[in-house]
Image (tube, helix red, strand yellow):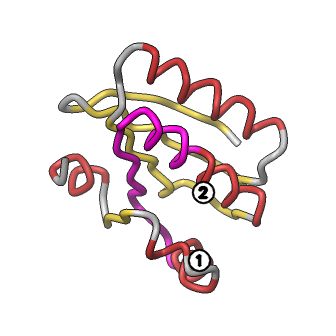
Amino acid sequence: MKIKTTEKYEAVIIELKGNVMGGEDTKDFNELLHKLIDKGKTRIVIDLGSVKFMNSSGLGMLIGGLTTVKKADGIFKLANVTEKIESLLIITKLITIFETYDSVDKAVEAF
């Protein structure tokens, strides 16, 4: 998994690419979130448009990210959720926990 960050209208967009499988990637993802929070950046959008595959550990990574950001009184949104990932969120009932948007722009506008 590759992680790329950009900023847009006081929000940080974290683009995930490849396979989201947890493991070492979870550590890198959490460290990135903590660094952003330490800088006062608590409006986070996760761009999932380039994610090819996500397993339960990858979902766990997103849940951990949501928890971390909410504890810092931040907002954590998912954008560009593919059909595969959306069905995974529906099956696991996590669709009710995450705010999901069709695009990064729509997620940013919703802040």
- Residue at position x 54%, y 83% in the image: 90
Indicate which disc, 2 or 1, sits on the residue closer to the N terminus: 2
Foreground of the two, 106 or 72: 72
Image location (x, y in percent) of residue 20: 70, 53
Q: Distance between the residues labelled 2 and 1?
A: 10 Å
- Per the image, label 2 sits on a secondary structure element best described as strand
The quarter of the displayed image where residue 24 is located: top right
Image location (x, y in percent) of residue 8: 24, 32
Q: Name the residue under label 2.
A: 51
Q: Determine whether, in the image, residue 8 is placed left or right of residue 81.
A: left
- Residue at position x 46%, y 29% in the image: 5
Reply yes or no: does residue 16 show up in magenta: no
Q: Name the residue under label 1.
A: 84
- Residue at position x 43%, y 43% in the image: 70
Q: Mark 2 and 1 residues: CB-CB less than 8 Å, in contact? A: no
Image location (x, y in percent) of residue 108: 23, 46
Amino acid at dot 2: Val
Q: Which segment is the magenta one?
A: 65-83
